[in-house]
Image: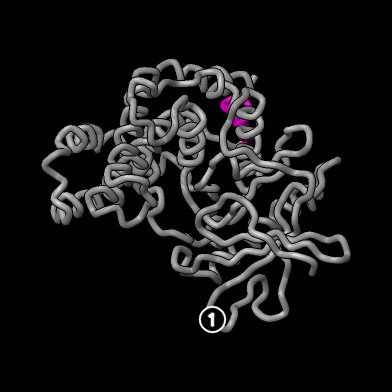
């Protein structure tokens, strides 16, 4: 080994780029087992998912399984991870050279490639047995769980902040029932549970030298869920013209061209396996994910800012208000956004 240096912008695991004297590069990660408590289940998920995608890619002419999906290096002890003397867990991947990622989506081409990448990822996993994939973070996108946590924080009010939050609490309560629609439809059998990514930020897509989607990364949250979660989570960051914590709410507006480009890329890859009910649920996911993130920020604010890092005592409240404003904007544009989804769904099914 020549060097091992910190790499990337992730906040959960510690990541290092390892350069060797034989010219082979690796990505070394220390797994945050305080967040991911079932490390064996976590790594089994990744092995199942990456192996399944590799086998799919081998059957596609011109595909490159070594570049288009992560390769986990097997160790001699525990399979695909190692545990050191201090109780920390480590894993290593082949490093994908000549790739890049972006924290922000700036162009329609980038949005299209992001949609294409996550649509293809879901499509590749549509026939993998969901029963072999475990929940790495239970109730991660379960809005009823998130609302229950908010209710507990309201009841306890440990920091005595509740008296100034009547507008935010009213906003949440007015939408409680509607925001549970995806969960209800899933439980009623209308929406199939599938293997999804669960963290569809744009920087979890590696692009090649020509800004074409090459590989989906950060597979720690891959677990069962509904496709609308992945779709809505991606749109939450792509469509918002303002930062996630924008204090001036009138600056929060929707970037419809980026939304349209993502929809085109996503449905180009995913239309073949999606049911009509799933397509109709995508707009619900678009509204749900910023609402749920706002609920989480508000909960943390009430609890004394114990989960998210903050830059001021009111940072989480500022974040919550910005997310709720984004929901308002999305509600106003719901019909327009839904029609864009239907347009490209119908285009792919001609």
| Res. 289 in view | yes
From this viewpoint, which residue is outermost toward the left?
163
Quarter of the image with the C terminus is top right
Residue at (57% x, 26% y) in the render: 263
Relative image position of residue 53 (x, y in whole percent): 70, 51
From this viewpoint, which residue is outermost toward the bottom?
85
From this viewpoint, which residue is outermost toward the right?
22
Residue at (42% x, 35% y) in the render: 244
Is residue 113 part of the magenta span, yes or no?
no
Figure check: 134 above or below 155: below
From this viewpoint, which residue is outermost toward the front?
312
Local crowd size for mark 1, using a 10 Å CA cut-off: few (<14), some (14–19), many (≥20): few
Is residue 263 part of the magenta span, yes or no?
yes
Residue 13 as seen in the image, left or right of residue 91 = left
Quarter of the image with the N terminus is bottom right
Relative image position of residue 327 (x, y in whole percent): 34, 28
Residue corresponding to mark 1: 86
Identify the magenta region: 262-272
């Amino acid at each position: 080994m020549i060097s091992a240096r910190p790499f990337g912008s992730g906040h959960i695991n510690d990541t290092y780029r390892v350069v060797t004297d034989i010219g082979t590069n690796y990505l070394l990660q220390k797994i945050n087992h305080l967040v991911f408590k079932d490390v064996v289940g976590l790594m089994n998920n990744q092995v199942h998912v990456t192996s399944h995608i590799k086998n799919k890619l081998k059957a596609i002419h011109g595909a490159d399984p070594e570049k288009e999906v992560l390769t986990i290096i097997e160790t001699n002890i525990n399979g695909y991870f190692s545990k050191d003397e201090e109780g920390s867990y480590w894993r290593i991947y082949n490093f994908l050279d000549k790739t890049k990622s972006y924290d922000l989506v700036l162009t329609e081409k980038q949005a299209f490639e992001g949609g294409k990448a996550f649509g293809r990822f879901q499509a590749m996993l549509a026939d993998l047995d969901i029963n072999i994939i475990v929940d790495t973070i239970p109730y991660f996108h379960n809005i009823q769980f998130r609302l229950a946590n908010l209710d507990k924080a309201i009841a306890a009010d440990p920091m005595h902040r509740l008296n100034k939050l009547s507008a935010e609490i009213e906003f949440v309560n007015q939408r409680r029932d509607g925001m549970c629609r995806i969960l209800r439809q899933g439980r009623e059998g209308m929406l199939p549970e599938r293997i999804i990514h669960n963290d569809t930020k744009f920087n979890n897509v590696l692009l090649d030298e020509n800004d074409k989607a090459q590989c989906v990364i950060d597979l720690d949250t891959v677990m069962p869920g509904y496709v609308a979660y992945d779709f809505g989570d991606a749109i939450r960051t792509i469509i918002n013209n303002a930062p996630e914590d924008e204090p001036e709410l009138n600056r929060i507006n929707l970037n419809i061209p980026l939304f349209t480009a993502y929809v085109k890329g996503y449905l180009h890859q995913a239309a073949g396996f999606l049911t009509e009910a799933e397509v109709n649920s995508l707009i619900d996911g678009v509204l749900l994910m910023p609402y749920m993130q706002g609920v989480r920020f508000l909960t943390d604010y009430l609890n004394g800012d114990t989960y998210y890092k903050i830059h001021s005592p009111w940072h989480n409240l500022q974040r919550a208000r910005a997310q709720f404003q984004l929901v308002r904007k999305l509600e106003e544009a719901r019909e327009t956004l839904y029609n864009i989804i239907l347009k490209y769904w119908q285009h792919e099914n001609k």
